[in-house]
Image (cartoon, helix red, strand yellow):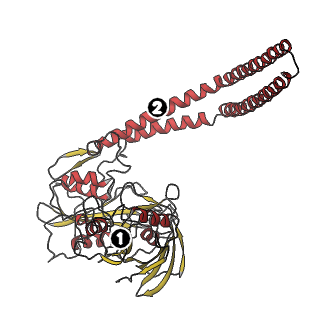
Amino acid sequence: MDSTYFQNFTTSIAGIKTPKKFTFPFYYEPHLLAKIAVKELQDYLESQTDFTHNFGLDASQTDLPIGKMFGVLVVQNQQNEIGYLAAFSGKLADKSLPKKFVPPVFNMRTKGSFYIKGEIEIDEINNQLTILESNKAYLALKKTQTKLKKTIAESLENQRKKMKLSKSSRKLHKKNAILILDDLEFKALTKKLMQESYNDQFLYKELQEYYDLKLEKNSKKLIIFEDKITALRKERKEKSNYLQQTLFSKYSFLNQQKEHKNLLDIFANPAIKPPAGSGECSAPKLLNYAFASDLKPIVMAEFWWGISPNLAIRKHKNYYPACQGRCKPILSHMLNGVVMDDNLLLENLADKQELKIIYEDDVLIVVHKPTELLSVPGKEINDSVYSRIKEKYPAAKGPLIVHRLDMSTSGILLLTKTKEANKILQGQFINRTIKKRYVALLDGNLSENKGTIKLPLRVDLEDRPKQLVDFEYGKNAKTNWEVIQRENGKTRVYFYPITGRTHQLRVHAAHKDGLNTPIIGDDLYGKKTNRLHLHAEFIEFMHPFTNKKMSFTVAADF
């Protein structure tokens, strides 16, 4: 058995019970053994000299700062000793593989590997493309072709305008002539005008043929270059696809039954390529080494080290679950047969909580939604505001739900009993005439007292339901905020969402370009506690039929 990467605890773990079930990697509270291993690894990262990488924590470093996910896997060896393995996701800036961390599932950068050879071949094609695409003769031909096309288009357009004017003139001439000419003279005129029309069309056709020949002459020279460029791009694509497919086949993952599956087997749909970086996360690296080395996995944990990326939210030293897009398919194979903790995401945590009705009339219902109750039924959990109201009011028609709150957010929610009322209230939301106020408790002190956050959001396609800040593809999202109180290192704030994007307040609070201070209890963007400290406290709207202004306030219980 290779025990190179098995690390003994330097901290005493005597008296700590070994759990009977392995960590459910997609939603967990780290076990004490995992926390101790993480602490030892973080102490190492604080002072190590084994590798060079700018995590964005040292202002004296000038390289591009990149934070990184690290992971620990507590294991038991064949001598029944408890230790741990460590890994990092992706690659380090200096491309090194320090002995502190388990090796990658497949090292594509070993000397003379097919991948490096393939990269060299693709780089050579790129160099040829660069030379061709920057060739002065090619650029001059392209410029001439573009200019010629523009000139031709303008010339033909002018000719069409002349023909249109001539046609109008002939029509007017004919109209006036019928009043003053006899039949014979009118017939002769009609023949003459028709001949003029044929002449115009003939001239236009000749002009087109002349320009086509002129374009073709220039194009023949241009095509010589473009055919070479097209052929090189095709060759590059073919080599890149082959390289990628071969790489996917080399990433082969073990489970406890010693069964191998590569990325092509795991992501079996040929229409869907494995996401970029699949197999490079710390969790698959750790488990693959453990199974290959006959080490029994006990518990695991992953944490972020360094500066947060621009799109996603990652906080230094915070724990994070394995990602859904890249890791879930891989870990589903690797953990096959491993007894794991229950998936808490499938538990209905609100089944015993009361849904309070705070107002009701013939068309409208206003409720106080408790934390952890869904607004509408989910894939696994049916219990929701919608299902409870539907059961209580079976005669109610239409969508019922006017707007939604995140499952973990408590507070005021509007519902309707009729389609007409629902449509009117939804129109108020769309037109942003409804006023809303949320109260939240943030995990830290804010230096300013109020402000506005504008960070566009989109879903993280590789880790749903998390949201990303994306200025290119995200939807506009705007939040006004103000501080209510600062208390014991925490800040209580009001949020006034101008838009209503998924997780908007949570992301705007936690993101480094927002308030950079997560909401307490945010298990997606901060740290899990007893609950998410976010509450829809106030709402004001116009009654859908009486047009009377209505407002409701329900104080938060945190």
Answer few, some or many: residues within 10 Å of disc 1's Cα (few below 14, many 20 plus, some between 14 and 19).
some
Estimate the x, y position of residue 50 in percent, counting from the top left.
Answer: 37, 63
Q: Earlier in the sequence, mark 2 or mark 1?
A: 2
**Residue closer to the observer: 524 or 433:** 433
**Residue closer to the observer: 517 or 364:** 364
Whether residue 195 is visible here, answered yes or no, is yes
Q: Residue furthest right?
A: 180
Residue kind at label 2, given as amino acid type: Glu
Of the 4 image quadrants, the one containing the C terminus is: bottom left
Q: Which residue is mark 2?
A: 235
- Where 55 falls versus 116 (above or below)? below
Estimate the x, y position of residue 468 in percent, counting from the top left.
Answer: 44, 61
Residue kind at label 1, given as amino acid type: Asn
Whether residue 515 is visible here, answered yes or no, is no
Estimate the x, y position of residue 7 in percent, counting from the top left.
Answer: 23, 65
In this rendering, would 105 be left or right of 213?
A: left
In this rendering, would 355 be left or right of 127?
A: left
Q: Secondary structure at mark 1?
A: loop
* Mark 2 vs mark 1, CA separation in Å: 45 Å
- Where 329 falls versus 339 (above or below)? above
Tell me the tag on residue 318: 1
**Residue closer to the observer: 99 or 86:** 86
Tell me the tag on residue 488: none
Point 40% across, 37% down: residue = 241
Which quadrant would residue 263 be assigned to in this image? Answer: top left
Which quadrant would residue 155 be assigned to in this image? Answer: top right
